[in-house]
Amino acid sequence: MTLNPSIMQAVEQLGYRVTVGDVAIQAGLNVAEANQGLLALASDAGGHLQVADSGDIVYLFPKNFRSILRNKYFQLRLQEWWKKVWSVLFYLIRISFGILLTVSIALITITIIIIITAANSDRDSDNRGNNFGGGFFFFPDFFWYFSPDYNTHYQQRRYQRREQSDLNFFEAVFSFLFGDGNPNANLEERRWQEIATVIRNNQGAVVAEQISPYLDDIGEGYKRDYEDYMLPVMTRFNGQPFVSDQGQIIYYFPELQVSAAKKHRRSISVYLEEFPWRFSAAGSGQIMLSAGLGILNFVGALVLGSLLRDGTAAAQLGGLVAFVQGIYWLLLAYGVGFLGIPLLRYFWIQWRNQKIAARNRDRLSRARLLASADSSLQQKLDFAHQFAKEKVIGNEDLVYSTETDLLEQEVERSAQMEAEWQRRLDES
């Protein structure tokens, strides 16, 4: 069984009674793919086909079709189970980096204390205190992060700046390291949804200039003048070109003109906008805390490395010190990576956002050309309006449905025709 999740979601959003065009628009799918997906879903979930007198088909699904599929197919149950398990596993992965940072700092700190304490064990308590304060100057700074005074100060600053973040400390560490995912992961899906919506808003007939603000790399010169960039759109939604007597091309899409219910005009952006990448969804205070702890971890690793350099301390003390020496290079690598990855990612995001801004400007400029249409473009738009139409298939338009027996439908239809004939006789 290969059921498309986006088709199932579209069916639910559209009220369980849909046409191929409805689903293609809602999910941004190829018309042929939407048609095949609806047929497969109707077959597996007990859906019904309603045929209008025009030959158009409406698909009607039971509202519990997901339960029907779960009961019918083990694979679907397994997928839903794995989705829940993966959400838990991914959360554990996210918080693991913050836990590793805390463990790394703790190991480094405790090991340094053990080595310094052992080195000064032959001195009196006053000298130990003086050596401790001078040789490990950054310790008070470290404990300051975890002191009540710091927490109060941090909360006050956060309240004053009115910064809000839904992330806890461990999630913020992961966000600082790796960000929060691609904000344009569904860009292609959004692109085709918005193009289909533009076509539906214009009742199935458009000109190329109405579609170009949602496309990329449409080219210049010959390619733009001859509107080659419309070929993928026509292929995806079964469009048909038509040329006017003046040589102007418009495009109409019969499948997208048919709907199972009256649709209101949907408001969408005048161009496809890509969202800029964010460095992190964590608040600035959380970012500063993560960076500060990363610096502390790295500096502590360097200090620890100088103490473990000759191997004497590990040989004499053994235990935890020997264990930390064995994994020292892992601790140092983690410290370098904790600071290096966000730094590289910051510059990469700047470069990426410049590219995104350039593409957004290009699409916006095409949208502005459409907004200030000249006489030639207005003539094309008027010509496209001649092909615009909307067909809504209601129950009164049906000639056949798989919900009931064919003989019953014929009897019911004959009775309706006789009633209509009698009404016309009475009126005459």
Image: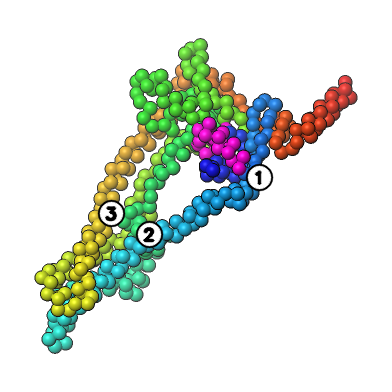
- For the point 40% across and 43% down, the residue is 184
Circle 3 sits on which residue?
342
Q: Crowding near pointer 2: few (<14 within 10 Å), some, many (20+)? A: some
Taking the image as shown, residue 378 lies to the left or right of residue 150, namely right
State left or right for residue 50 relative to residue 341: right
- Give how far apart the Cα atoms at labels 2 and 3 are: 15 Å
Q: Element type at marker 3?
A: helix
Q: Where is the N terminus found, in terms of image quarters?
A: top right
- The residue to which callout 1 is attached is 62
Q: Earlier in the sequence, mark 1 or mark 3?
A: 1
Which range is magenta? Answer: 21-44
For marks 1 and 2 on the same chain, the one whose residue lies earlier in the sequence: 1
Q: Nearer the viewer, mark 2 or mark 3?
A: 2
Mark 1 or mark 2: which is in front?
1
Q: Residues within 10 Å of mark 1 (few under 14, many from 20)?
A: some
Locate residue 396 relative to residue 119 in the image: left or right.
right
Q: Find residue 94 and name its label.
A: 2
Q: CA distance from mark 1 to mark 2?
A: 39 Å
Position in image of residue 137 (x %, y %): 18, 73
Give the amino acid at mark 2: Arg
Q: Position of residue 142 (x, y in %)?
A: 26, 71
Residue 66 visible in rendering:
no
Mark 1–mark 2 CB contact (< 8 Å)? no
- Please tell me whether residue 224 belongs to the stretch shown in magenta: no
State the residue in front, 232 or 412. 412
